Amino acid sequence: MNTLLPETAQSDVAPVIGRFAPSPTGPLHFGSLVAAVGSYCLARQAAGRWLLRMEDLDTPRVVPGAADEIMRTLELLGLHWDGPVIWQSQRSGAYSAALASLEQRGLLFDCGCSRKEILASAPHPGEEGPVYPGTCRHGLAPGRRPRALRIKVPEEQVCFVDGVFGSHEQILSRVVGDFVLRRADGLFAYQLAVVVDDAASGINQVVRGADLLSSTPRQIFLQSCLGYPIPSYVHLPLALNAAGKKISKRQGIIDTPESGREGVLVCRILQFLGQDVPLSIRGADPVEVLSWGVTHFNIRRVLMCDQRLVGNENKS
């Protein structure tokens, strides 16, 4: 069994380009803003650029007006991005080109299995559901019609070092199996789109929530297949409720910060991330608080934070 190791992270040798990539399925919640503030501070601390991408690819889940509300909230909090907003819904040509490249190399295959069939035949559960058993890997059975498009994964261990959680490794064939790049409904899968978009924008520093930690090996594998540079990765702890569960959008929703308390909310986010915000700026405007965060953000303090949000304490 071989091991796939990322080469030197691109951010080690090039100007940093980070990003925030929300899905416009509703207003930003506290957990979303943790990723926004963390990615902003780390990119700006390196004198880098910070881009905004709207991951509106899953059109059935997109809420009209949500993208505008997200951008308005970011601006109210002093989180100003560089360049134009990138919209995944406008980039189908780039995703099709990536699929064509992978298909030319014989890495893709049509899959006719339904979710129910995969669940019934999976050898064991993986990190995110049943492991695909390879039913259609060598061709569709007679009478089967193609549904999803999958990529063949090798018996290879993918290893990387996360900026917060340290060394992480995964054998894709045992944890997820051959995974989907184009869904049965015709939509491009998240794993493909995020890899193509990050490469196209020159993203070399990915800062996001720890719920996406297990997705990273798939993305590194795809980057390797497509010949893309591999970014450095930083996964921030998730905001949890009193029961230790990831907060839902309903639990974590914030009041629109228009009451002069925008800076208080940014302070709370930095404190959640373990940063020792001085008393002297806890009532300051968000630009001043973010300026302190950019200068003093310490990644080593992140895992020291209290990740629980109880009741309405997440409200600004």
Image (spheres, rainbow, N blue to C red):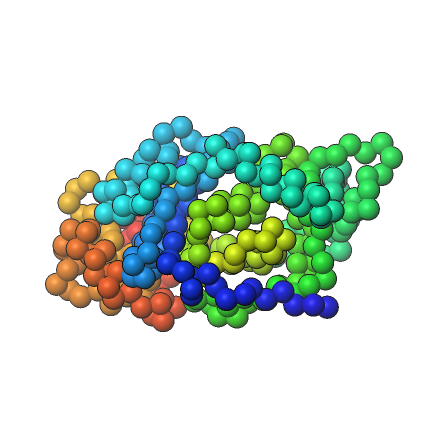
**With respect to residue 178, does 244 lie above or below?**
below
Q: Residue furthest front?
A: 14
Question: Horizontal and vertical percent for residue 182?
Answer: 63, 39
Question: Horizontal and vertical percent for residue 22?
Answer: 41, 43
| Residue in the foreground of this view, choosing between 30 and 86 | 86
Residue visible at 43% across and 36% down in the picture: 87
| Residue in the foreground of this view, choosing between 45 and 22 | 45
**With respect to residue 237, does 29 lie above or below?**
above
- Indicate the quadrant where residue 13 lies: bottom left
| Residue in the foreground of this view, choosing between 265 and 98 | 98
How many marks the image carries: the answer is 0
Residue visible at 35% across and 67% down in the picture: 299
Question: Horizontal and vertical percent for residue 212?
Answer: 50, 54
Residue 99 seen in the current view: yes
Question: Horizontal and vertical percent for residue 183?
Answer: 63, 37
Say whether residue 13 is left or right of residue 298.
Answer: right
Residue visible at 15% across and 45% down in the picture: 260
Q: Residue furthest top?
A: 64
Q: Residue furthest left?
A: 280
Q: Quadrant of the N terminus?
A: bottom right
**With respect to residue 26, does 160 lie above or below?**
below
Residue 119 seen in the current view: no
Say whether residue 88 is left or right of residue 39.
Answer: right
Residue visible at 33% across and 42% down in the picture: 83
Say whether residue 236 is left or right of residue 296.
Answer: right
**With respect to residue 210, does 145 lie above or below?**
above
